[in-house]
């Protein structure tokens, strides 16, 4: 494998904010800390509405725009693919502009993408979705590094707050987009455009961060051979497969439930409920998993919850769907937090963790995007439930197999080496 250049290695390490960082790891004063906290929460709120707001009105969008089920699947796939494609650009942008300025610019791009998909017909719909996905991919890479840098002593708590903000944003968009569309005379365009406002608000609150200055890392480190490591690929595949199930839910759950007789509003509320339940799960499961010898038990339990919840969405009596939605959400919240924890548990040091994270999220999200697209292809041929059940089961089975490998108490076989001047 071709060695990565020292410059590229240094870029990834700068995002990690490692122990070589001089200067205090906490904000300079309480006021700045509170303002930064508010900014992080508001930015986190914007990382899912562009995705979850579309699903409840997808039938309206498809009917109004003349989209086939396959094209509808592509529309739900495109932003997820852009998470993986554009996320790796974040280190380069951060090195040139700084993380704070990069996030500000990308918030502008996010708002522009959300607005663009309501204009210029099919071109705007797809181009805006791609732009929004690219923006979310960049921000998602940068925020954890800022949390680690400025809240080093409370990184776990702040990561939980960030995760809760992310889930809350997704739930709000899933639950309120259909009522907004009905308010605007059953027009999906202003209902989707409304979700540009939180991005603009986040930009306004984030703006003072552009004046901050941070010391650069003193050390540069090289990590070689991670793409040849079997365990790194097991972690990457597990991240991608569990994310595939998550983005199927984000993109298609309301449409699937509408086929069962629910209204668009009811389908959106089910997605909103399922997403909200992820919040306590993402905090509780890691605490329980800490008592286990390895990550296999939480992988098995949460994966069983997810597949049971998905099958319940397809076959359970409609008056019990609220219970299955809650089960699905709890499983997905725990599964996602477990997948994130593997990035640290399988890495010997923080430098390797940075590269493993980039690999797992870049390649993993590209793999995840295939799930929503496959659902679109299936629905283009038939609205029967058994092909969807088979797809969900196959993805879950594959996630189980690689999860049992990735969940073992082992470390990837690469190490970080300092680059001597």
Image (cartoon, rainbow, N blue to C red):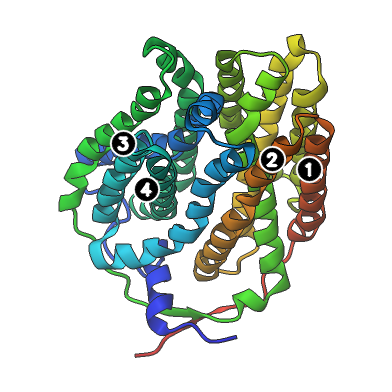
Say above or below: 85 vs 8.
Answer: above
Q: Which mark is residue 199?
A: 3
Q: Give the crowd class for mark 1: few <14, some 14-19, many >=20 residues within 10 Å.
A: some
- Asked whether 386 or 279 is in front, the reply is 386
The answer, for residue 286, to whether it is visible in the render is: no
Query: Contact (CB < 8 A) between labels 4 and 2?
Result: no
Task: Mark 2 vs mark 3: give the one in front.
Answer: 2
Q: Residue 421 location in percent, x, y?
A: 34, 90
Task: Mark 1 vs mark 4: give the one in front.
Answer: 1
User: Residue drawn 20% across and 36% down?
Assistant: 204
Q: Give the crowd class for mark 2: few <14, some 14-19, many >=20 residues within 10 Å.
A: many
Query: Contact (CB < 8 A) between labels 1 and 4?
Result: no
Q: Which mark is residue 375?
A: 2
Residue 111, image quadrant: top left
Residue 256, image quadrant: top right
Please tell me which of labels 3 and 4 falls first in the chain: 4
Q: Which residue is mark 1?
A: 391
Please tell me which of labels 1 and 3 falls first in the chain: 3
Task: Mark 3 vs mark 4: give the one in front.
Answer: 3
């Amino acid at each position: 494998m071709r060695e990565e250049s020292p410059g590229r290695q240094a870029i990834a390490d700068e995002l990690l904010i490692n122990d070589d960082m001089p200067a205090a790891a906490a904000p300079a004063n309480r006021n700045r800390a509170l303002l930064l906290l508010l900014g992080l929460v508001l930015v986190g709120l914007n990382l899912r509405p562009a995705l979850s707001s579309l699903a409840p009105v997808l039938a309206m969008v498809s009917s109004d725009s003349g989209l086939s089920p396959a094209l509808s699947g592509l529309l739900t796939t495109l932003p997820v693919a852009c998470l993986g494609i554009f996320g790796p650009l974040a280190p380069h942008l951060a090195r040139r502009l700084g993380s704070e300025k990069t996030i500000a610019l990308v918030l502008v791009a996010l708002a522009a993408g959300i607005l663009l998909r309501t204009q210029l017909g099919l071109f705007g719909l797809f181009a805006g979705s791609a732009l929004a996905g690219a923006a979310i991919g960049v921000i998602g890479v940068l925020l954890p590094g800022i949390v680690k840098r400025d809240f080093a002593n409370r990184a776990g708590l702040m990561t939980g707050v960030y995760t809760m903000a992310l889930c809350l944003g997704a739930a709000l968009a899933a639950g309120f987009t259909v009522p907004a569309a009905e308010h605007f005379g059953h027009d999906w365009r202003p209902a989707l455009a409304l979700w540009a406002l939180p991005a603009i608000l986040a930009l306004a609150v984030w703006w003072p961060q552009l004046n901050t200055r941070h010391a650069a890392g003193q050390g540069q480190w090289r990590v070689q051979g991670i793409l040849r490591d079997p365990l790194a690929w097991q972690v990457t595949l597990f991240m991608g497969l569990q994310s595939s199930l998550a983005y199927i839910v984000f993109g298609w759950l309301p449409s699937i439930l509408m086929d069962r007789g629910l209204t668009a509003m009811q389908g959106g509320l089910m997605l909103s409920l399922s997403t909200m339940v992820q919040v306590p799960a993402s905090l509780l499961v890691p605490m329980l998993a800490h008592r286990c010898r390895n990550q296999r038990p939480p992988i098995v339990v949460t994966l069983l919850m997810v597949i049971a919840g998905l099958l319940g969405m397809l076959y359970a009596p409609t008056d019990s769907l609220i219970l299955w939605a809650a089960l699905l959400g709890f499983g997905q919240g725990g599964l996602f937090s477990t997948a994130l924890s593997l990035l640290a548990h399988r890495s010997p040091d923080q430098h390797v963790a940075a590269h493993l994270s980039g690999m797992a999220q870049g390649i993993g999200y590209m793999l995840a995007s295939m799930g929503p697209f496959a659902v679109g292809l299936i629905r283009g041929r038939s609205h029967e439930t058994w092909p969807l059940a088979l797809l969900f089961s196959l993805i879950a089975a594959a996630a189980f197999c690689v999860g049992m490998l990735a969940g073992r108490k082992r470390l990837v076989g690469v190490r970080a080496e300092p680059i001597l001047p």
